[in-house]
Amino acid sequence: MLGSTFYHQTIRKYVAAFGTIFNDINVERKNSAGAVLERIKVPLAYGPRQKWILALQETTTDRRVVQTRLPRMGFALTGTTYDSVRKLNTIGRNFNANTSSTGSVMTQYNPVPYNFDFELFILVNNAEDGTQILEQILPYFTPEFTVTINTIPDMGIKTDVPIVLNSATQSDEYEGELATRRTIIWTLSFLLKGMIYPDIKSGTVIKTIEVNFRIPGSQDTDVSDLEINYIILESSKDALRTSDYILLESGNYEKLLDESSSQDVGDATVKSRYTVVPSPTTAQADSDYGFSETFEFFEDSKHFDPNAGVDYTDSDA
């Protein structure tokens, strides 16, 4: 199960998409007349909250750390949990054309739902800057904001991902003397409802479906006391095995026979054939195509050789 190595960068895309939402927020400083004196683009970076608090406190020349300018924002992925409510059918699959090989198609099982916890930190040195940034964020989350992510380009999968705002809390880091720098930190908690995708596999393309309808030969004496309806399948191995019967509700049996079996099937000739092929026949998996259906009826019943893939009559045998 864990032998194949693959990486779709799905979580990386979720982190990038989350950060992109908040990378164009500005703070304006105005005078008493309402004129804009200064317009500051709030920088955004990935990292835990403790990193930014330490950067604010550390100003020694020995560490060669310059005091961080406020306002600024940071965000981090803090955890992930399985979401059973959004679970899909485990054996369901997605298909897409394999552009590198015309005779195959790419397949991928349904993704697994996971919730990703994010935190956004807003660091300011006055309450006005904090509320100004907050008001540029809150109106868009009601309580969720949906973004479209090109999650699996090879499969042509683009996903609408909801991001839910759960809470917003404030803390004031001001302590000590009046000369100490004040820092107000807003912490916004989000939940991103994402999917994790399994590896992509390659499968063959079926371009022709052929069904033969036959008239069966003599009935099997093992069940001569029952009315038998015959079904001839190419997958059956032994015409005489009782496991090759299907018991109907009426008490009758459906008998399953193999085309290569010498018992009964030797007299079961092909009377009609139903064939389905794509239209046009040169269509690929990602082409716009339909289906062409053909019904054939044979006055002189035919036999079909599954090994050679050809028809023949009794006179040809």
Image (cartoon, rainbow, N blue to C red):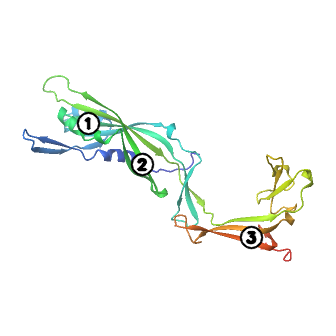
Amino acid residing under circle 1: Ile
* Marks 3/1: CA–CA distance: 72 Å
Residue 225 drawn at (x, y percent): 92, 50
Sequence-wise, the earlier of marks 2 and 3 is: 2
Going by the picture, which residue comes out furthest to the left?
33
Sequence-wise, the earlier of marks 2 and 1 is 1
Viewport quadrant of the N terminus: top right
Q: Name the residue under label 3.
A: 309
Mark-to-mark CA distance, 2 and 1: 26 Å
Task: Between residue 76 and residue 218, name the one nearer to us.
Answer: 218
- Residue, disc 1: 122
Q: In this view, does 55 lie to the left or right of 306?
A: left
Is residue 225 shown to the viewer in this render? Answer: yes
Residue 202: quarter of image = bottom right
Where in the figure is residue 266, as x and y percent of width and height?
Answer: 86, 65
Q: How crowded is mark 1: few (under 14 residues within 10 Å), some or many (20 or more)?
A: many
- Circles 3 and 1: CB atoms closer than 8 Å: no
Residue located beneath label 2 in the image? 160
